[in-house]
Image (cartoon, rainbow, N blue to C red):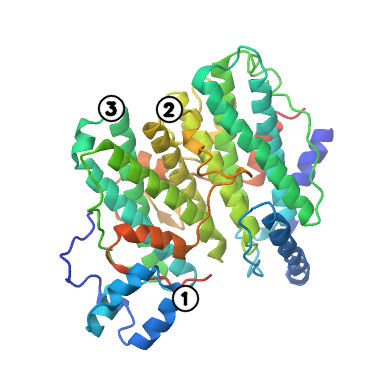
């Protein structure tokens, strides 16, 4: 159950999953309003290989299925991260408690990823495996691993919180709700592991506002942040907004 | 009696009226536009216009956003008074645990204020705070003198809160910023729950229907948490779990409580 690692330049995903005929003009038109980030856009436009551009961009799709694919993309990222964490040097030397927490997180995110893939494929088409880029993470270093875990968990919470209103189907919203509170539990525990001397860290003022509300981020903002760790180009322009 | 009336009104489930609902619902959500403006002034991330909902909730019944927010307000009143009372009880809490409870208490007070403002801004009337009995009729006699009891009840409240908000979310489909705000409170409750559980030496997440050891009165809080059916699929099956154990699959999904289930739990603590 590993994510796919490819060398730069290799094709990713299944061409059949995309609109092959999507023209560059359409691409540019859409990218102006909805593509994940300017950085992603520039990368996608390097070179003159139109086929590569269309084939390598993963379209999340539209409607509720698009939002589920968006969630699936984030769960792929988290699951791939914890998979690497469990194979890394920090984990090998971590305390028993930290190991137990990280092993649970790996399992939970893997379960989320596989469930979403199965669920999406039963009603639409799940996006292919994304290519991740963890080159900025030092898996042998506690601060690097836990800091990234915190960033991913807080990001996941804000992503589900922001995407809820984009769903029309109450059953999908419920499942998203079942997942997001577990992500929030993860975030709280990781935050306390990072700052054992700060009894407020689990829900610190850096993440909870003056109304007692957690963060909510829209997909464009989330993907811009996540983009640092995802090599595959993601087109979110067809998502509901 | 007052308490029963209160719960009645809070748990009232309107039958969906297919012929008349669209108009009234549209009117209701028209007012949602107001909250987007009013609450934006207090730096709330509303600001996306409410969409007209497509269908009634999955349950085939509906509750107005005011119903939902007043129900949430009841639960927040409960938590807010609980933590404030705990913090003012001499000798109950100390050290890091006290600091953690202060942080949680601050959030619950903020939630009460936020929900009241949201209800008022939408033309509703916030319910009054009921009188609470945190001993639950004597089941938790030492709740404000014994830190362990206090934390056990706190865990029950937080895990109930997470499940209760989740159970209400479906009624807010199509309400835009209101749903977002409810979700933003929901995840804060989950952070609280995880922290309290960790202080108590437990996992931050719920395995199966594992309740609070030695406190059968809290079993209702965890009833149904062992569910593995998601969207009609068995999330613990090999295909949908990626080989993750059933216990961990149950941890990976928090389950909702219905309005009645959550009310029954809250009701144990209302005079």
In front: mark 3 or mark 2?
Answer: 3
**Residues at discs 1 and 3 both on one chain:** yes
Separation of disc 3 and disc 2 at Cα?
14 Å
Give the chain letter at badge 3.
Answer: A
Neighbours of disc 2 within 10 Å: few (<14), some (14-19), many (20+): few
Q: Tag 3's secondary structure?
A: helix
Give the chain letter at badge 2.
Answer: B
Q: Is residue A105 left or right of residue A197?
A: left
Front residue of A117 and B101 = B101
Q: Is residue B56 above or below residue B6?
A: below
Q: Name the residue under label 3.
A: A96
What residue appears at the point 62 percent right and 46 percent down from the top-left corner? Answer: B258
Residue A33, numbered label: 1
Q: Is residue B180 above or below residue A35?
A: above
Give the chain letter at badge 1.
Answer: A
Q: Is residue A137 left or right of residue A113?
A: left
Separation of disc 1 and disc 2 at Cα?
46 Å
Q: Tag 1's secondary structure?
A: helix
**Residues at discs 3 and 2 both on one chain:** no
Front residue of B20 and B88 = B88
Q: Is residue A234 left or right of residue A83?
A: right
In front: mark 1 or mark 3?
Answer: 1
Which picture quadrant has residue A138? top left
Front residue of B85 and A1 = B85
N-terminal of the pair, mark 1 or mark 3, is: 1
Residue B196: x and y, percent?
50, 29
């Amino acid at each position: 159950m590993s994510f796919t690692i490819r060398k730069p330049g290799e094709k990713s995903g299944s061409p059949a999953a995309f609109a092959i005929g999507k023209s560059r003009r359409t691409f540019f038109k859409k990218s102006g309003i909805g593509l994940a980030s300017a950085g992603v856009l520039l990368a996608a436009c390097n070179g003159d290989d139109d086929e590569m551009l269309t084939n390598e961009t993963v379209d999340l799709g539209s409607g509720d299925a698009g939002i589920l694919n968006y969630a699936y993309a984030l769960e792929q990222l988290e699951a791939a991260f914890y998979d690497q964490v469990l194979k890394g040097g920090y984990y090998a030397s971590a305390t028993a408690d930290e190991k137990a927490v990280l092993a649970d997180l790996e399992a939970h995110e893997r379960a989320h990823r596989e469930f979403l893939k199965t669920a999406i494929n039963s009603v639409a088409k799940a996006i292919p495996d994304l290519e991740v880029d963890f080159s900025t993470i030092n898996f042998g270093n506690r601060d690097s691993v836990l800091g990234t875990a915190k960033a991913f968990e807080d990001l996941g919470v804000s992503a589900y919180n922001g995407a809820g209103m984009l769903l029309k189907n109450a059953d999908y919203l419920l499942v998203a709700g079942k997942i997001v509170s577990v992500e929030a539990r993860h975030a709280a525990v990781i935050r306390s592991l990072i700052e054992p001397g700060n009894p407020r860290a689990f829900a610190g003022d850096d993440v909870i506002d003056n109304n007692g509300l957690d963060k909510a981020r829209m997909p464009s903002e989330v993907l811009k942040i996540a983009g640092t760790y995802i090599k595959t180009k993601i087109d979110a322009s067809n998502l509901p907004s | 009696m007052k308490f029963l009336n209160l719960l009645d009104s809070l748990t009232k489930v309107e039958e969906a009226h297919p012929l008349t609902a669209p108009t009234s619902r549209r009117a209701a959500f028209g007012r949602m536009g107001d909250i987007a403006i009013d609450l934006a002034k207090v730096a709330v991330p509303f600001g996306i216009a409410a969409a007209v909902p497509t269908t009634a909730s999955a349950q085939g019944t509906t509750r107005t956003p005011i119903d939902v927010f007043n129900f949430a307000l009841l639960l927040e009143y409960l938590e807010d008074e609980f933590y404030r009372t705990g913090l003012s009880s001499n000798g109950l809490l100390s050290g890091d645990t006290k600091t953690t409870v202060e942080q949680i208490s601050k959030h619950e007070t903020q939630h009460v204020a936020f929900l009241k403002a949201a209800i008022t801004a939408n033309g509703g009337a916030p319910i009054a705070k009921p009188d609470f009995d945190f001993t639950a009729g004597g089941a938790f006699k030492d709740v404000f003198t014994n830190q362990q009891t206090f934390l056990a009840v706190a865990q029950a409240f937080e895990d109930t809160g997470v499940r209760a908000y989740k159970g209400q979310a479906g009624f807010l489909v199509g309400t835009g910023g209101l749903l977002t705000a409810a979700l933003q409170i929901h995840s804060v409750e989950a952070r609280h729950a995880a922290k309290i559980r960790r202080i108590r030496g437990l996992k931050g997440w719920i395995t199966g229907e594992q309740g609070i050891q030695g406190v059968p009165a809290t079993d209702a809080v965890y009833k149904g948490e062992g569910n593995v059916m998601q969207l009609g699929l068995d999330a613990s099956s090999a295909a949908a779990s990626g080989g993750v154990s059933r216990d961990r699959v149950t941890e990976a999904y928090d389950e909702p409580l219905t309005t009645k289930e959550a009310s029954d739990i809250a009701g144990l603590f209302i005079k």
